[in-house]
Image (spheres, rainbow, N blue to C red):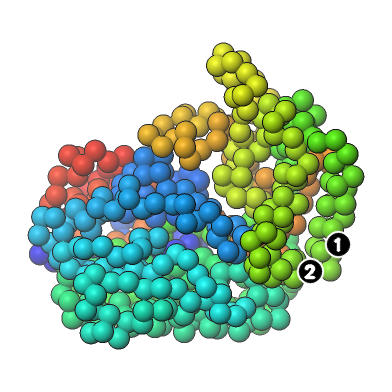
Amino acid sequence: MTKTIILGIDSLDPYVLLEHKTALPNFARLMEQSPTFVSQSVFPVDTIPAWQSIYTGLSPANHGLLYVYDVFDPMFTGLEKISIENVKGRTFWDYLGRVGFRTVVVFPQLMYPAWKVNGVMVSKSPFERTVDWLTTEVDVSACPETVMETYAIPTKHVSLWGGFPNDARLSDWAEFGKTVIEKEKRIGLALCQNEDPDLFFMYFNLLDPVQHRLWRFFDARDPSYPGVTALKAKILDYYAIFDRIIGQFVDAYPDANLIVLSDHGHRSRPARTVNINEFMRKARYVVSKRRKRALSTVRKSILDVSNRLNLEHFLIRMVAKNERLTTASKSIYSSAGSIDQSKSRAFLSNFAGIKSYSYGGIEINRDLMSEDEYEETRSALIAELSALKSPHDAPLMEFVKAREDVDPGRFCERIFPDIIFSLTEGYGVGWELYSNLYGKAYDHKVASGGHNKDAVLLLRNIDKEVKDKVPSIINVAPSILDLFGIDWKEKRLDGKSIF
């Protein structure tokens, strides 16, 4: 059996690769050789739901794992409530191992602790302990445990802090991340070379936070682009690192099947917002608490001053020190403290975080209505939101749908709010009350990068005809099973093989 090597790079963007391919020779060769290039991420376009769909071939509503990292929550409040039991044993490497293929899996996203596989699995905990404003420490586990000593894998892995260190430290922060990737690569290469797997999979996570923090310094189209600075080259430096890593694997295994993929791409996060709660307040869906209008005005003033004086990073650092501050900051930023949810018929959901992403959801208060009234309310609100127009009289919504019309899986009601929507290009979700319908994103300078639904799927040496040239990432797992001659159809997956 020909060895198959899969390199997963979080947030690897196809359009960055296209624009800078002359500086990325190994990516450029892959792009020329591969029958596929762009793939489509899941909804919501975020790390945890996307990678679990890649691993399992299931949609988010069928694997049930949804958590969105939040700039105002660097302590990852609520992440401990996520259970991987619905995924454990149902990944592509589990299926391969059960029929005798040897697998080596290194640092798969969220899959911790490592479990028994037919080969080796090394996992990093998703829970970070902040060491300082550049670094964090996470626990590492392996199965079998003996590989930790054999390959000098530390039980505690020092990595890059995912928060915002402040502008003065961004360069040092980005430089440290490069050393982390190099250490991880050495572990992966040693395992691949010495354990002789049929399938080798390794996941790299750091490109995602780096692009979140540094995008405005990289992309001249970003509204907060400061011009050419020393930070402009940092993102491309990371692409060059991964280009070299790909070259090392190709040189070591020139005849191996190679798959390089991402969960989503990256782009500028919307700087303009649409204040959905304010729209619903005026439409009498949202009820504000008494005497809270003044709080909304004070909140807006605080955020305006912070944005003007570049103080956002100080707010983030304060929040990171205390869970109560995390809760308070979310309430202030999202105006949640100003809304009387017990009396409101509908209000914005924070299922996608409180950042200014282009997608979001709305909760409907079923306690205030019958089942018939619920359906009437949901249909009416979908129609009203669909009719929203931009200042230039263009549609504001890409789509507004009932959750079951987006992803009707068995965990649909548990992970999604009643209504799901996506705004058109350039607009993000705003949270203000007693304001204009249109606003600005106060978190843009600390997290100027956002996710793009277009991901990367590059193939090398795959001796099968590709029938689906722009597949969903949900099709990755069944395609891998098909590549190994396993009947993927009997697994009852949501995806299908691209071959």
Q: Which residue occupies the foreground of this view, 26 or 279? A: 279
Q: CA distance from mark 2 to mark 1?
A: 8 Å
Q: Which residue occupies the foreground of this view, 262 or 236? A: 262
Percent across and percent down for residue 220 are 67, 66
Identity of the residue drawn at 77% across and 31% down: 287
Q: Which residue occupies the foreground of this view, 468 or 497? A: 497
Left or right: 166, with 61 as reference point: right
In this rendering, the answer to whether 233 lies above or below 433 is below
Q: Residues within 10 Å of mark 2 (few under 14, many from 20)?
A: some
Percent across and percent down for residue 156 are 41, 79
> What count of labels does the image hold?
2
In this rendering, the answer to whether 418 lies above or below 62 is above
Left or right: 58, with 376 as reference point: left
Q: Is residue 313 visible?
A: yes
In this rendering, the answer to whether 435 lies above or below 177 is above
Place residue 444 in its image quadrant.
bottom right
Identity of the residue drawn at 69% across and 31% down: 342
Say which amino acid is labelled 2: Leu
> Mark 1 sits on what residue?
305
> Mark 2 sits on what residue?
311
Q: Which mark is residue 395?
A: none
Identity of the residue drawn at 60% across and 64% down: 74
Say which amino acid is labelled 1: Val
Percent across and percent down for residue 13 are 48, 61
Q: Secondary structure at mark 2?
A: loop
